[in-house]
Image: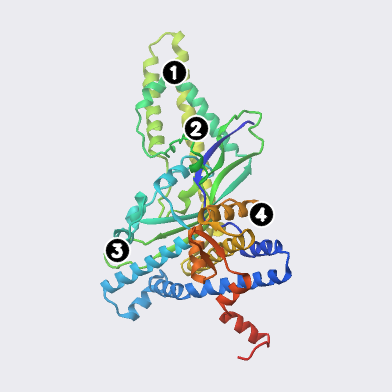
Amino acid sequence: MEKKQEEIRLEKEIVIPILKSQLIRTLTGRIGDPSVRAEFLKLCKRVEYTIRAWYHLQFEDMMYLYSLFDPDTGVQKLEQQNLTPDEIDILEQNFLTCLFQVMDKSHFKIATDEEMDIALSGQYLLNLPITVDDSKLDKELLTSYFDKHHHERLPDFADKYIIFRRGIGIDRTTDYFILEKVDILIARFWAFLLRVTRLEEILAKRSHGRRKKVPRKNNENNPAVDQEFELEKRIRLENMEISISNLLSKTTIQEPAFERIIVVYRKASTKTKKERGIYVKQFQEIPMADMEIVLPEKKNPGLTPVDWVWFLGSAILGLVAVINSLGVPMADLWVLFAVISTVIGYFAKIYFTYQQSLATYQYLITHFLYDKQLDSGRGTLLHLCDNVIQQEVKEVIIAYFILMVQGKAAREDLDKRCEHLIKTEFGKSCNFDVDDAVQKLEKLGIIAQDLLGQYSCVNITRANEIIGTTTEERVLDVKQGNAKP
C-alpha cells in the first residue's frame, strides 16, 4: 500500500525537551577533572534552589488566588472573604495575570487560528464535526483580561476559552481500519458515478456548511526563516491506494501531536447564579487533527450540514430521475441504474461513516478521560510551577556550561552553541531562549559582558561562592549531622 505523506511546517519549540537529571548527568560526564565535576554538580543544585526561591512567592500568590476560583471549593472561600463583586473581579484578573505569566515562563503558547487551521486540516481518528456550545461558556472573563493585556494573533474563540499548547511529538496508530477503508472506497465510487452521470456539475453549488480549512502553502525558500521551523509528517488513509487486496491488512497512520495542551475557560452564569469558577485542564499527547476533543462544553456530534445537503439532494435527484425515466426508451435505462446506484451508494456511505465515527467518538471521549487528561485545577497549576523551575534551571545550566567549556561568546553565537549542544548530545531540536538564559545568569552574578559584547563566565568555584550556601543545603547538612541547627 503506497503511503503518501503530508508535511506540516511548525515553529520550533522553545522548551528544552530533555530531563534535567539526564542533562546534568550528560554534561557532568564531559568534565574530566573530578574537582571541577564536583563543583559543577554543586552549582547545578544551587542554581535550582535559588531559582525555586525566586518563584516561591509568585507561585504562592497564584495558588491562593486560584483557591478563590476553584470550581469545587471557591464559592465557599469567596463567601468567607465577604468581598464585593468589583473586588472579586480584580482578584480574578490578578489570577489570570499570574497564570499567563507562568504559562509564558513555562514556554506554553496560545494556539492561534492559523495553527488551529493546520491542526484541523486533516482527519485522524475523530471524523465527526465537533462544535462548542457557546451559550454554556462565559464571555466576560477572558474578554476583560485581553482588553487590558494585549496579545498578538489571538484566536477567534479567545473570548470564550484559551488553548495553550507546548511540545510537538508523533502519534501512530496501527489497526485494520476496515470500516474507514470501506467508507473511502464508497466515497471514491460515489465520486466516480457523479462524474459519469454528470451529477457532479448539478451538485457543485451545494451549501459549504462547516468544513475543515486547508492551510495555505508557503513556497518561499528562506534559509534564515526555515531554521526556526521544522517539518512534521502526516500519513492518512485518505492519501493511500486502497483496494480489495489490502482492505483486510493492518495499516499504520501517523499524525503530529501536541505533547501538552492546557485549556482555560469559565462556564456561563445563569439568571440565579453568578459563575465564578475557572476551569484549568491539562491534556497530553493530543493528535493535532483531533484537537476538537479537548474543547469545553462540546455539543453532541451529528451529521454535518454538507452531509444533509448531499443526502437530501441525492434523494430528490434520484426520485426525479426515476420519474423522468419511466417514459424513456430501454436504451436509456442504464442512466436510471447509474443514478439509483449513485443514490444508494451515497446513502450507504452516510450510514457507515456516521456509525463508525460515532463509535470512535465515544471511545475517544472515554480514552481521553482516563489516559489523555493529566490533571485539572490545582494539580495542573502545581505541575506548571514545576515546569517553570525545570526549564529555567536547564537554560542556566546549558548556557553556563557552554561558556565554561568553550569560552567567550556573543549572544547570537551562544544561542547557536547551546542549540548545537542539545542537537548533538541529545538528538533534540529546540529554539533555545538565550535572552532568558543570559538574564538569569546576570541576575545570579556569574557571567559578565565585555566592551565587545561578548559574555564570559566566572570560575566555577567563584560561581559557587557568589551564589552562596542555600537554605536547602543547610537543612541537608543538619539532617546529615554535618552542621548545627
Count all numbered tags in the image, as a single digit.
Answer: 4
Q: Which residue is mark 1?
A: 197
Q: CA distance from mark 3 to mark 2?
A: 43 Å
The three-letter amino acid code for the residue at tag 1 is: Thr
Q: Determine the CA span between mark 2 and mark 1.
A: 19 Å
In this rendering, the answer to whether 57 lies above or below 437 is below
**Amino acid found under the numbered disc labelled 4:** Glu
Mark closer to the observer (4, 3) = 4
Disc number at residue 348? Answer: 2
Q: Are marks 2 and 4 in contact (CB under 8 Å)?
A: no
**Apparent side of residue 199 relative to residue 393 in the rendered image (left or right):** left
Element assignment for label 4:
helix
Q: Is residue 107 left or right of residue 153?
A: right
The kind of residue tagged 2 is: Ala
Most foreground residue, 335 or 72: 72
Above/below status of 345 relative to 176: above
Q: Distance from label 1 to label 4 (Cα)?
A: 61 Å
Residue picked out by circle 4: 425
Mark 3, residues whose alpha carbon is within 10 Å: few (<14), some, or many (≥20)?
few
Q: Which residue is drawn at the image coordinates 40% and 10% (left, top)?
A: 328
Q: Amino acid at mark 3?
A: Thr
- Which of marks 4 and 2 precedes in the sequence? 2
**Marks 4 and 3, Cα distance to the nearest angstrom?**
56 Å
Which residue is tagged 3?
A: 270
Looking at the image, can residue 366 be seen? no
Q: Position of residue 51 (x, y in %)?
A: 52, 71
